Amino acid sequence: MPASERYEFHEYDVVVVGAGGAGLRAAIEASALGARTALVCKSLLGKAHTVMAEGGIAAAMGNVYAEDNWRVHFRDTMRGGKMLNHWRMAQIHAQESPDRVLELEEWGALFDRTKDGRILQRDFGGHKYARLAHVGDRTGLEMIRTLQQHAVHKGIDVFMECTIQTLIKDGDHIAGAFGYWRESGKFILFRAPAVILASGGIGKAYRITSNSWEYTGDGMTMAYRAGADLIDMEMVQFHPTGMVWPPSVRGILVTEGVRGDGGTLRNSDGKRFMFGYVPAFFRAETAETETEADAWYQDKKQNRRTPDLLPRDEVARAINAEVKAGRGSPHGGVFLDIATRRDPEYIRRRLPSMYHQFKELADVDITREPMEVGPTCHYIMGGVRVEADTTQSTVPGLFAAGEVAAGLHGANRLGGNSLSDLLVFGRRAGKYAAEYARSHPGGLSVDEGQIEAAIKAMLVPFEGRGDENPYTLHAALEDGMQALVGIIRTESELIQATDLIASLHDRLGRVSVRGNRQFNPGWHMALEMDTLLTVSEAIARSARERKESRGGHTRDDYPATESAWGKVNVISRLAASGEMTIAQAPLPEPPPELRAILEEKG
Amino acid sequence: MATATTAHPTGHHGAGSHTVTLRVWRGDAGGGEFQSYQVLAQEGEVVLDVVHRLQATQAMDLAVRWNCKAGKCGSCSAEVNGRPRLMCMSRMDTFKPDETITIAPLRTFPSIKDLVTDVSYNFEKAKQVPAFKPKPREADGTYRMFQEDIDRVQEFHKCIECFLCQNVCHVIRDHPENQRAFAGPRFFVRLAALEMHPLDTNNRLDLIRQQAGLGLCNITKCCTEVCPEHIHITDNAIIPLKERVVSEFYDPVAWVLRQMTGRNGKK
């Protein structure tokens, strides 16, 4: 039967892939500008990863500290990212996030309040001032629900439990997207001049992760195969505080808000070890004594920030080192103590989800005992290379926003900068995709050959070519990436990792799944292994390329941060041969007025 | 990393592990039955972990929804030993070691496959809720609200849309014909959140009385009992909405006052 009889067909101006914060905000904007917009997501609406975000949205509104403004936020973001950020994205992000937060409020979000009735802002790692608009420790839920309800009331077409697997091109341009309904296994084609990727990250490549099953690198893989550049793929963020016990919950996030609200890290000797891990880069702005650190929570003018709130890469490495040195907690983490520092009522009010999560899943009452925490794969700073203002990738018609895109966060993302990223660049993606669609109306042809090839590839697991189990392959990949491309990396292990990925790729060709195409998780896993292997290869090979340590990328064999490496991005690109090539490209330099901000002291 | 190994989906027997009997409903809209499996369970695990191990080792095509595995997204709702709950928050050590654990899909919603049901009813009801309509911003471009004025609405915003309350509500669980004109507890919570929002100017009381079918609820509190977020659905959302409807439509004194003052009775 010809391919055209084997799929359902839809035509839109803009197709948004992913319905977390970035996808929802993009769809709202595109639709508001008159573009016929489809929002396609792998899960039910409202279940995307944004729902799990806890701490808050970073925006220099100055509600708690009037001294705060976009320049300070810009500087914090760039320094937190070890200056590998795209300066223009960091500028736009810092300038626009306050308006995006106020807009959420106008759409019904209810943030916690200051005494004078404004939006309350909380302290977080790497931010000079209390800057995160929040709702207890469930800010992501408030954000996704607000955006979801707004999108529903605007009548945007939502395709739930529908996975996009391939981008379709007409010549050099995007012409649509192709995938399948999870429920029925039936194929679906969207023809559209503009596609926005808002599909999140890659966390399921790692064993210990805070990410859900959806984080399988689909968007990055599709963009890469469509010819787009990926950059900074070696920059993976290990959040310092994931749960470590019991094994079932290992990796589940413990919000940085615990430390923002006064919690402190301790080793098995009871020592606040972060004071011993302050790098020279942050020494001038970090407290030297416990007294100063504790006073900083109340008075930021006279005191410097506690080292408990150094950027995440620093804290994760410190915890890793303490555990390795034998000063860890009983289950291989360290202690996070808020019980001795804040009263129970305050803890329950500020951190209700953390209280509930530890009580229900670990039998720990965080108002009475310390938590045990350790690093967990949380975020990838790398991803699709985009043009800073428009979010367009290097492929015309293909846009990317949120975690799938790269540039804003450089080598390390600050907590709270993700939710603001989703809003700021989600809106921009929607705007520029709608404008692009308007200036490229109609006339796109969808090549049946591309569809035929996509269908063929997707059905391989049903052909019974071997007896490999997709779940077994996934477990092997997770263990391999965890052990070989984790927080601390070294040449020989990165070579082992690429060998492992190649062998898993071979084995994936021999995967067989049981049953039919109707809601078949084994089949879905087999298809997601394909994308996970692609992004894992990009991560391992980019990590091998960058011979220095910076942000989320630490090389045991190249421990220094090298200024020459601070001027280049590592690119992963599909070569004509079908192989992945790794290259370097110069990082854009900030103009003098922004450079001056970055060079200010303190 | 120099850290202990973790639960492995295809893993081996380790300390604290034991074999459990799971009875899982397998089937689709055309029908199905419970099938029994022997599956390894390890220390500290929840029901969802064991279901995942079953999927990875014996039943690759077992359909189940999940996302966050931390009680935050509301995807993995099921009926575990007859009790509607989130599988990710159901600890294995709350069952006796030799107890058979029966896992069924939510009964109120039509079957799609195995543990996955068609919850589109809820998404249709969401579309019918009249949108939030804020009053204008203050002169400085912001809104001023005080914490004590938003505490009760923030309680409603904790809803993770697991639809367990919809599943146990006997108005629709036993009478699918009521679905047409009944929003269910989740949307009474949503309507209450909008009605009590300090900035909102829309009036939904007529909808609440008619299309949303608030009158069908006879406050048996089944919804409140299953809410994993411990939202006081009946006491804080449904009963206050019922009181507002009564005062709007059935209180003659309030009616006369509204005619005299020209106010629509909201807030």
Image (cartoon, coloured by chain):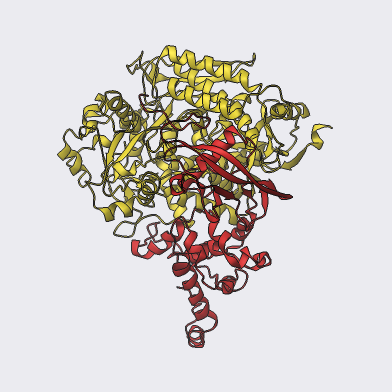
Chain colours: A yellow, B red
Residue lying farthest to the right in this orientation: A1
| Residue A405 appears anywhere in the view | no
Q: Quadrant of residue A220?
A: top right
Front residue of B230/A106: it is B230
Query: Measured from the top left, where is residue A322 in percent x and y?
Result: 27, 27
Q: Is residue B69 visible?
A: yes
Rendered position, A145 above or below A536: below
Q: How many marks?
A: 0
Expressed as whole percent of the image width and height from the top left, the position of residue A198 reads 55, 38
Name of the residue lying farthest toward the front: B98
Residue at 59% of width from left, 40% of height from top?
B37
Q: Horizontally, is A55 left or right of A531 in the view?
A: left
Quadrant for the N terminus of chain A in the image: top right
Q: Quadrant of the C terminus of chain A?
A: top left
Question: Where residue B136 sits in the image (x, y, percent)?
Answer: 45, 63
Q: Tell me if residue A114 comes above or below residue A86 in the rendering.
A: below
- The spot of residue B174 in percent (x, y) is 64, 65
Residue at 42 percent of width and 65 percent of height: B198
Q: Quadrant of residue B154?
A: bottom left
Left or right, A375 with respect to B238, comes to left
Camera-side residue of B154 and A515: A515
Classify A306 as above or below A576.
Answer: below
Give the residue at x 48% y 74%.
B266
Of the pair B36 and A354, the residue shown nearer to us: B36
Q: Is residue A529 left or right of residue A135?
A: right
Comparing A86 with A565, the one in front is A565
Q: Quadrant of residue A487?
A: top left
